[in-house]
Image (tube, rainbow, N blue to C red):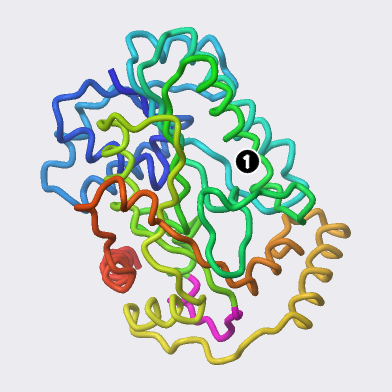
Amino acid sequence: MVLVTGGTGLVGSHLLFELSKSQLKIRALYRTKQTIEKVKTVFSFYSNQGDDFFNRIEWLEADLEDLPKLETAFEGVTHVYHCAALISFDPSAYYKLRKTNVTGTANIVNLSIINGVQKLCYVSSIATLGFDPVKITEDTNWSSEDSQSVYAMTKHEAEMEVWRGIQEGVPSVIVNPGVILGPGFFDSGSGLLFKRVYKGLKHYTSGVSGYVAVGDVIKSMIFLMNSDLKNERYIMVAENISFLELLTLISKGLNQHPPQKAVGNFVLSIAWRLDWLTHLLTGKKRKLTKNLCKTLTKKSYYSSDKFLKTNTAFKFKPISEEVSEVCQLFSKTV
């Protein structure tokens, strides 16, 4: 039995589609019935038999902090894909992030130990990696002294829980994907970029980051779980491109004008302070934090050489191709 946490998210839903094409017994966790509908939508993108594949999954309502339900979820489980996570860069969400990302992962690890799980795959992020101006690898040192986002801090702590599980006998692999691009979730994460470009986006920042198609993340996870590789982490980045390049690709795919106005550090420094003041006076959620502004102008170049050396037949999908396909599917939703 394979257990998938975060089955109603971008990575989890695409992973479930791939797994459901096999003869594996699959159990997936969800929090609300409304989120399951998004999974059905994702399945419909790839097959006319989406309902048949969907019905092969055993769904269980469970929160990562609900130990009694999690204990039930682990019955008969041999392999775990831990995809569930909360994403937020709002400092006020720190304790909420800790509950899901750190405590939730600790619970998954502990139950994996207790139930003798044969292998665990944890979906982390490039946010947990250190910084090097030339090339960032799995060995680039993380520094807690750097100004890290609350999201990065909690994902880093979650990775530490997985390493603890490894020391206590649970073979595991950790994947660190770049910004994941894929269809089905246009109200959150990278999907919001497509919606914002569609509505008209005039400004861009100078940053560079790593990007990867969701399908490549899924293929790499399944490959690692089926291999003898264990107790390692792997960066999953197809290309390092500028934000302007990405926004231009999306603009082309949606027949919109690409952004023309660059936003520099000075304007961003004012913007995040105004955002903080608005939050202080009105209680509204933060949209632009100091850490996020730093990320928007940072030039980060990630290397996936470690993974490619373990799977020499693997080739990452070009980002231009993934963006084009996502744009086509997005256009059907508006």
The image quadrant that residue 231 belongs to is: top left
- Which of 34 and 195 lies nearest the eye of the viewer? 195
Looking at the image, which residue is at 23% across and 34% down? 19
Q: Amino acid at mark 1?
A: His
- 206 above or below 77? below
Quadrant in which the C terminus is drawn: bottom left
Image coords of residue 157 (percent x, y): 65, 35
Position of residue 128 measured from the top left corner of the image (x, y, whole percent): 60, 48
* 54 relative position to 262: left or right: left
| Quarter of the picture holding the N terminus | top left
Q: Nearer the viewer, residue 139 or 300?
A: 139
Quarter of the image for residue 222 reads top left
Would you place residue 322 above or below residue 24 in this image? below
Q: In the structure shown, which secondary structural element does the residue marked by tag 1 occupy?
A: helix
Residue 172, magenta (yes or no): no
**Residue 323 appears in the rendering:** yes
Residue 332 showing in the rendered view: no
The percent position of residue 233, horizontal first and vertical second, equals 46, 41
Q: Which residue is mark 1?
A: 156
Q: Residue at x 58, y 81 (%)?
A: 204
Q: Residue at x 53, y 64 (%)?
A: 135
Provide the residue span drawn in magenta: 196-206
The x, y position of residue 180, in whole percent, is 42, 56
Residue 205 falls within the magenta-colored stretch? yes
Report the side of 275 relative to 318 (left or right): right
